[in-house]
Amino acid sequence: MSAFDALMAHQHQTEALAQVAGRLGWDQETIMPRGAAAQRAEEIGALETVLHTRRTDPKVGDWLAAIDDAALDPVGAAKMRHIRRSYARATKIPEALATEIAKVTSRAQGIWAEARAANDVAHFLPTLEQVVALKRDEAAALAAGGDLYDALLNDYEPGITAAEIGAMFDRMRPRLVMLRERVMASGKTAPRISGQFDEDAQMKLAREVAERFGYDWRHGRLDKSVHPFSSGSGSDVRITTRVDAKDPFNCLYSTIHEVGHATYEQRINPDYALTPLGAGVSMGVHESQSRIYENQIGRSHAFTGWLFGRMAQMFGTAGVADAEAFYAAVNRVHSGYIRTEADEVHYNLHIMLRFDLERALIAGDLAVADLEAAWNDRFHHDFGVAVDTPANGVLQDVHWSVGLFGYFPTYTLGNVYAGCLNLAMRAAVPDLDRDLAKGHTEGATGWLAETVQRHGGLYEPRDVIERACGFAPNEGPLLDYLDAKFAALYGV
């Protein structure tokens, strides 16, 4: 067996074990008994120890030294790029630290959920303090004297820095704020749906919509969780949603969003399964798929026309007169508290808030004890509304409890990528709206599968988008799309 073949065999088992770890996380968020949290933390910690040992095995270093990447085909060279990056990262992290992070963040999920349900920030802050300290230790080990936040960001979006993202956000913020102010000053009030929406009926429609967007039920399932998510890759990719009897959009658009993530994983070239190429290449590219499914396709004038018909069949007109009013209701602009329920005008402002706060936490410029006050002050400044409860403020997201520092900015980066992809997709699929009006998304999802999803980790993140679009990704197409859409909706 050559060094390359031996390394690939080792990597195959490591990837399989990582999938098992992911399945434990899915179980914890969906059907695990509440009383099992402490034991699950030990189980996840033990598995993380095994994974860390495999990823830092000296044999991996020997195999890497023996392989000439230049002699490999493009697929083999891409696999080596990922493994070399992963090995360099893993060997910088002490095993005890990796295990402790896994155990503490597993416990922290349950503590966060309890605190959120009780609106009790004090219940969560000591645990968050632990998580932040551990992630700062991890960042210090990875950064080797460099920027701590960049070291964490690299786990989610390789090849970009916080400075680059901050500069992009600085360019975006004035146009977003100006659009928000124009809409809010328009005097136009969008319709709102009203009524009680049976939870079982919502889940039935969510399953239908998921199928319309290409979700493969042979290799997936839909469950409920506090915070919707997608889990897995290859032949086992699961999604969750949440249900509110007064707001079916929460369920439907959370489902569409997670289907965007899930179909990305399901449509990767099956030859890449359980290899470094067998998952989405970055969270920014991943988010581009969920956001373009949810927004540019799912909230489009054409698709909402079809969705209105299905909603009316199942629930009645829900207080809106026709498809035009329904389209306006789906895209209603309002200064809400919750990021996952935010309209497209406000969404990126939510992300910019989190980016600045978590960057300050990791840098040591913001103490965990001062986080709630900092959040509330910034939210009032950016949205003009005072936070009413912690569950609508600093406790609303699961991400910090599980240690996902550096993850939040990839949401807006995904929106930026989605804006670029939407521009290219509409040029490539001229009859798209005609099909969407009939509930047929295959033109859009097929184009995305071919240009983005099938490649998995073959290319670097920004290269994936540039190859699909024919131009380097930038924020212009997203901002132009938002201006055009909401100027038309609100007459501004």
Image: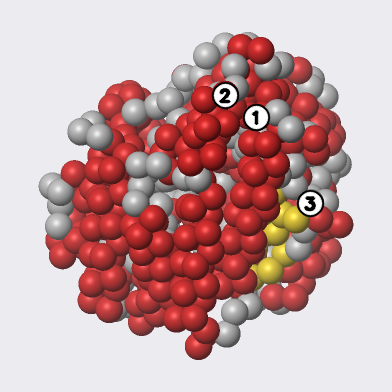
Question: Residue at image x 63%, y 78%?
Answer: 31
Q: Quadrant of residue 465?
A: top right
Name the element at disc 2: helix
Q: Which of marks 2 and 1 precedes in the sequence?
A: 1
Question: Image check: 33 left or right of 164?
Answer: right
Between disc 3 and disc 1, the foreground one is: 1
User: Residue 197 has which mark?
Assistant: none
Are dots 3 and 2 in contact, CB under 8 Å?
no
Are dots 3 and 1 in contact, CB under 8 Å?
no
Q: Amino acid at mark 2?
A: Ala
Q: Amino acid at mark 3?
A: Ser
User: Residue 3 has which mark?
Assistant: 1
How far apart are the alpha carbons under marks 3 and 1?
Answer: 28 Å
Are dots 1 and 2 in contact, CB under 8 Å?
yes
Q: Which of marks 2 and 3 precedes in the sequence?
A: 2
Question: Residue at image x 52%, y 59%?
Answer: 50
Looking at the figure, which quarter contains the C terminus? top left
Q: Is residue 20 visible?
A: yes
Return the residue at label 3: 235
